[in-house]
Image (cartoon, rainbow, N blue to C red):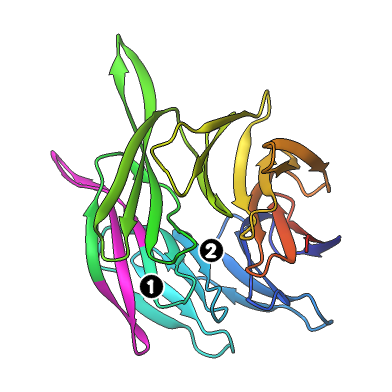
Amino acid sequence: MRIVACSYKSVREVGFTPDARTLVALGHLSTPGRCEWHDLAGDRPPRVHTLSSISWNGFAVSPHDGTVLIGDATELLEFPPAGGEVIRHAYPDNRLWKVAVSPDGRRLACAADGISFGRNRVPIRLSGHTRTGKGWKQAWKFDGTGTRFGQPVFLPDGKRIAVLQSGGKKVKGRFEPRATLSVLSTQGKLLHERSYAGAFLDLAVCGEHLVLGDSHLLRVLPLADLDAEPVLVSLGNKHLYALCGDPLGRFLLAGCGKQVLEFDPASWKPARQFDWKIGTVACLAVSADGTVAAAGGDKGKVAVWDVG
């Protein structure tokens, strides 16, 4: 295990290039965000890019070629893997909130916040984009009925996208949160939809399972049968902040407070627990080849460890 020190206080997102030799970390102090590329195989100083605004949202690293994508207000910023000039793409729908990239790097799924104008409201929106030369072309839109989309994820077949949207309603004067799981094709066709009680925070793929993370509870669904009753995994008094699955299905990582729990999918019970003094765990990542993992916290540090 090694600790990577970033130049800012709060690490919000982490990811790896496909060869797992570079850690990409995104964070901020209290001003514009900063993205850093840290060399894990040598001693080169990190490559750094400071964003132009404080309203950035959305982060993804292509598992195909290491392209980094960041949502910056009404723009999608694209950082080529070899460095050079940042490519800026105008984003047409609302405020870009989350972004995901397909395994082949040819498709994007972007989630946008809703916007209210007096009594009029633009709904939350999930949109699909396909690569066209050096640009991205919007191929479809899917409007949600909730208050916000979570992080979309491409399923292992690369042909489906899963996303959670939060919502709820008042019952006898009390708000009861609910979340809706939607699965769409890469052409924007709704394939599956199911509602769950609870305020879900995260969604992760772990091998052949889809894991829904509530604040103190995980629900595990088999990808082969999303209508099946989920396996319930209690986190006890621990609060979930981040969730990430091994693409090979060997383990699931959950950031709970200042600790990282590693779950064994054979029993869905914690197998190991880590506390690396990096502060409250805000983000997790596992490399595409399943050899290394990373956890970022609010002390400006990222823990990187071997899992292969």
Q: Residue 125 lies in magenta, yes or no? A: yes
Badge count: 2
Decide if residue 52 is on the left or right side of residue 260: left
* Residue 40 placement: quadrant: bottom right
- Which residue sits at x=67%, y=70%? 289
Q: Are marks 1 and 2 in contact (CB under 8 Å)?
A: no
Q: Residue 232 lies in magenta, yes or no? A: no
Label 2, secondary structure: give it.
loop
Pick whichever of labels 1 and 2 is earlier in the sequence: 2
Three-letter amino acid code at the position of disc 1: Arg
Residue at the spot of label 1: 107
Whole-angstrom CA distance, mark 1 to mark 2, is 28 Å
Q: Residues within 10 Å of mark 2 (few under 14, many from 20)?
A: some
- Residue mark closest to the camera, 1 vs 2: 1
Q: Can residue 265 be spotted in the picture?
A: yes
Decide if residue 95 is on the left or right side of residue 237: left
Q: Residues within 10 Å of mark 1 (few under 14, many from 20)?
A: many
Residues in magenta? 110-138
- Which residue sits at x=40%, y=52%? 162
Decide if residue 58 is on the left or right side of residue 301: left
**Residue 243, x across and y down, in percent:** 60, 47
**Residue 14, x across and y down, in percent:** 63, 62
**Residue 236, x across and y down, in percent:** 67, 24
Question: Which disc is residue 32 wearing?
Answer: 2
Q: Quadrant of the N terminus?
A: bottom right
**Residue 28, x across and y down, in percent:** 60, 59
Residue 44 to residue 189: above or below: below
Label 1, secondary structure: give it.
strand
Residue 216 to residue 306: above or below: above
- Which residue sits at x=36%, y=70%? 75
Q: Can residue 52 be spotted in the picture?
A: no
